[in-house]
């Protein structure tokens, strides 16, 4: 199903009936809705979470493939998106970011440094407009700490690559 979803996104038809037939069962098998207590006050940032009982049994290749689908899907949200002025638009951004955090978790469990960094980068790109507000939404602090924690898990090269220092500062 992940490969079908990737092909649908690549051909630019994520609104087709094929998308819903492939995406919904894939997402439902890998993710679950967070409890009311976990979701409360998150404005959509903690709506879904990775099903740990499933993730612990899956091979790294499947987790990595699911992470790629999530990132491709949410990368499309960046293209041509307007500044999130309304609460509904901000909630939509946070829901997309929630999926990016799930992708980061999958990539981290798969042991893929590249996918983890791509997921962190995409999550930060999605919330970058929310960070421009004078008063930042309070739900962004846990998101930023999850991104930093995901990056700290991996051994990075001893020499500094140009983007590494900038990524660590975020």
Image (cartoon, rainbow, N blue to C red):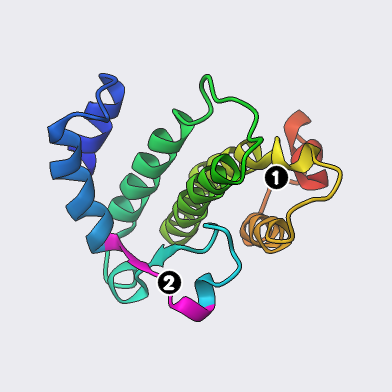
Furthest residue in direction bottom, as rendered:
37
Mark 2 and mark 1 in contact? Answer it, CB < 8 Å: no
Is 108 in front, or is 51?
A: 51
Image position, residue 33 (x, y; %): 37, 68
In the rendered image, which quarter is residue 59 located in? bottom left
Secondary structure category for the residue under label 1? loop
Indicate which label's residue lies in the foreground, 2 or 1. 2
Give whichever of discs 2 and 1 has the lower sequence position.
Answer: 2
Q: CA distance from mark 2 to mark 1?
A: 36 Å
Based on the picture, tell me whether residue 36 belongs to the magenta stretch: yes
Rendered image quadrant of residue 60 = bottom left
Mark 2 crowdedness (10 Å alpha carbons): few <14, some 14-19, many ≥20: some
Viewport quadrant of the C terminus: top right
Is residue 91 shown left or right of residue 155?
left
- Specify whether 63 is left or right of 1: right
Residue displayed at 52% across by 57% down? 44
Q: Which residues are magenta?
A: 30-37
**Residue ID for mark 1:** 157
Q: Where is 149 relative to 19, above or below?
A: below
Q: In the rendering, at what x and y percent does residue 7 appear?
A: 22, 28
User: At x 24% / y 23%, what residue is drawn?
Assistant: 13
Vertical comparison of 55 with 155: above or below: below
From the image, tell me which residue sits under label 2: 34
Instruction: Specify whether residue 67 is painted magenta.
Output: no
Q: Position of residue 8 (x, y in %)?
A: 22, 28
Give the residue at x 28% y 53%.
Answer: 62
Q: Secondary structure at mark 2?
A: loop
Decide if residue 159 is in sight here: no
In the rendered view of the protein, which quadrant contains the N terminus? top left
């Amino acid at each position: 199903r992940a490969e079908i979803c990737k092909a649908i996104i690549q051909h630019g038809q994520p609104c087709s009936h094929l998308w819903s037939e492939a995406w919904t069962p894939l997402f439902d098998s890998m993710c679950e809705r967070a409890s009311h207590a976990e979701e409360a006050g998150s404005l959509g940032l903690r709506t879904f979470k990775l099903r740990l009982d499933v993730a612990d049994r899956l091979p790294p290749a499947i987790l990595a493939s699911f992470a790629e689908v999530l990132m491709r899907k949410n990368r499309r949200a960046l293209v041509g998106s307007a500044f999130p002025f309304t609460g509904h638009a901000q909630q939509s951004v946070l829901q997309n970011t929630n999926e990016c955090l799930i992708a980061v978790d999958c990539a981290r469990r798969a042991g893929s440094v590249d996918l983890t960094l791509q997921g962190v980068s995409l999550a930060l790109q999605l919330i970058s407009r929310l960070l421009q507000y004078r008063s930042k939404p309070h739900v962004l602090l846990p998101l930023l700490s999850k991104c930093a924690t995901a990056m700290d898990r991996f051994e990075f090269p001893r020499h500094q690559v140009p983007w590494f220092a900038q990524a660590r500062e975020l």
